[in-house]
């Protein structure tokens, strides 16, 4: 089966970007949303993005026009999927809504059509089992913004065939992205399982060690090789996204995350980060201002608790057959912008020290911190 025609359901933040990268790779794309005005807005954004590439001489005007002409906005669902070989669903992260969308879709899409969901946190198998084709259902998790981010997590559900996984991997490659397979449909997949708990852990570290945001962020960025501080990264991502992911992941697995109440509080107070002008830090105007971080500030913070947290979750992914060290490093580099391999940092700090830290945290704060058996065996 070769894919030529792709329908994207949902034209919001992610959907319009996935439409653009697919059209750029030569696919015929139908972009579907529930209202024409949403599609008009999405097409406007795609045009703006392509024009920018033309003005930077990354593509020619003709190429830009050709890419744009490959995307057809359609509201009517049957019409939107009539030629599709693959449907990528990018509707809001609400389980009931996704199930409703798939129930409608299942009725109108031919039985051969592959369903791929861009969900960040919802279980693939559970959604797949509500359709008539769980064998042709797969997770395809692009990162924001899809036009720039290289990583795509591919998550086969319990019944997804190898053939469908292979077709999905080919598609990811064809749109010039790098796939990492999450071999088990676990809450948070790979990147969110590493990143979301870290935000909570950074809040605990601040309380426990009485540190400032800037001290923690300096150590996180300058000592661990992240592109920015963890609080900066949280503000950049948005506390609405982090809160929602926390809820979904924690609902399904209490071991993945130790929720810190501040995250929910900030969400309720609409301190969403850069997008609302205030998150952990305050932002003026629309312009993104970097927080001032320094080696001096970094010296005040020992980030071992953060390393212990991310490493324990990485080890969990390996112990549970969802991933391996190489794939986790690749995902972290492409999805989190990590410049220094995670397990290199861990070895530098000493796996034994990390296991000791986790045992100490477990004694003081509960079983959540119990070190994974893999880490214990690596000491
Ligand atoms: N925003 C992110 O950073 C990000 C990153 C990775 C994955 N995701 C995932 O992508 C999905 C979409 O997120 P988003 O941020 O693009 O949301 P969004 O709210 O920006 O866009 C969702 C779009 O879906 C449309 N929609 C609703 N019902 C629909 C239907 N029945 N058919 C077609 N379209 C419909 C909405 O009108 C809206 O335009 C979610 O599952 C989310 O978890 C988001």
Image (tube, helix red, strand yellow):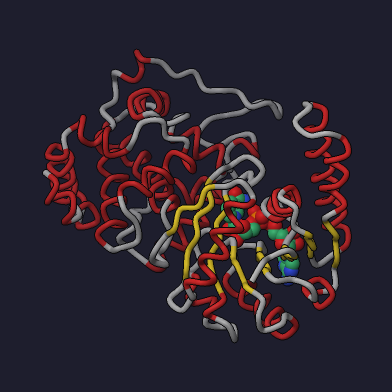
User: Which residue, as the protein is rendered here, is positioned at the far front?
Assistant: 1
**Residue 85 shows in this picture:** yes
Circle count:
0
Rendered residue at 26%/38% (across/down): 305
**In the rendered view of the protein, which quadrant contains the C terminus?**
top left
Q: Nearer the viewer, residue 5 or 247?
A: 5
Residue at the far top: name it: 296
State ligand 1's quadrant. Answer: bottom right
Look at the image and tell me in which quarter the N terminus lies.
bottom right
- Residue 325 coordinates in the image, percent (x, y): 30, 48
| Vertical comparison of 346 with 258: above or below | above
Choose top left, top right, bottom left or bottom right for residue 317.
Answer: bottom left
Can residue 268 be seen by looking at this rendering? no
From what the image shows, is residue 317 above or below residue 124?
above
Q: Measuring 41% from the left and 63% from the top, which residue is drawn there? A: 187
Q: Is residue 206 above or below residue 254?
A: above
**Residue lying at 71% horizontally and 78% vertically, measured from the top left:** 105
**Left or right of 279 on screen, residue 82:** right
Residue 263 locus on image (x, y percent): 46, 47
Q: Is residue 134 above or below residue 271?
A: below
Query: Measuring 57% from the left and 65% from the top, which residue is drawn there?
Result: 167
Q: Can you give x and y, in whole percent of width and height, for residue 180 in the image?
A: 45, 53
Identify the image quadrant of residue 35: bottom right
Q: Is residue 109 left or right of residue 258?
A: right
Q: Nearer the viewer, residue 304 or 375?
A: 375
Residue 155 at x, y percent in the picture? 48, 64
């Amino acid at each position: 089966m070769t894919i030529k025609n792709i329908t994207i359901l949902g034209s919001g933040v992610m959907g319009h970007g996935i439409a653009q990268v697919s059209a750029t790779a030569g696919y015929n794309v139908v972009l579907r949303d529930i209202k024409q005005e949403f599609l008009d807005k999405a097409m406007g954004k795609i045009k703006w993005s392509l024009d920018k590439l033309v003005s930077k001489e990354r593509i020619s005007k003709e190429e830009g026009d050709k890419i744009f002409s490959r995307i057809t906005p359609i509201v009517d669902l049957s019409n939107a999927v009539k030629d599709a070989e693959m449907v990528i669903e990018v509707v809001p992260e609400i389980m009931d809504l996704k199930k409703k969308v798939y129930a409608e879709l299942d009725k109108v899409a031919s039985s051969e059509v592959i369903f791929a969901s861009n969900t960040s946190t919802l279980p693939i198998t559970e959604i797949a089992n509500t359709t008539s084709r769980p064998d042709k259902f797969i997770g395809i998790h692009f990162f924001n913004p899809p036009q720039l981010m290289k990583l795509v997590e591919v998550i086969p559900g319990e019944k997804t065939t190898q053939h469908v996984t292979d077709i999905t991997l080919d598609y990811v490659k064809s749109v010039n992205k790098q796939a990492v397979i999450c071999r088990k449909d676990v809450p948070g997949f790979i990147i969110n399982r590493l990143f979301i708990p870290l935000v909570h852990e950074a809040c605990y570290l601040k309380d426990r060690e009485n540190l400032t945001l800037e001290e923690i962020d300096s150590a996180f960025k300058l000592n661990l090789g992240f592109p920015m501080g963890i609080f900066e990264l949280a503000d950049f991502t948005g506390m609405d996204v982090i809160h929602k992911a926390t809820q979904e992941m924690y609902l399904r697995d209490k071991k993945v995350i130790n929720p810190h109440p501040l995250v929910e509080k900030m969400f309720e107070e609409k301190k969403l980060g850069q997008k609302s002008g205030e998150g952990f830090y305050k932002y003026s105007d629309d312009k993104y201002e970097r927080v001032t971080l320094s080696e001096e500030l970094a010296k005040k913070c020992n980030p071992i608790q953060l390393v212990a947290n991310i490493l324990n979750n990485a080890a969990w992914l390996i112990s549970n057959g969802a991933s391996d060290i190489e794939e986790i490093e690749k995902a972290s580099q492409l999805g989190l912008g990590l410049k220094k391999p995670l397990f290199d940092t861990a070895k530098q700090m000493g796996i034994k020290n990390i296991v000791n830290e986790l045992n100490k945290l477990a004694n003081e704060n509960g079983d959540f911190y119990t070190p994974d058996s893999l880490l214990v065996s690596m000491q």
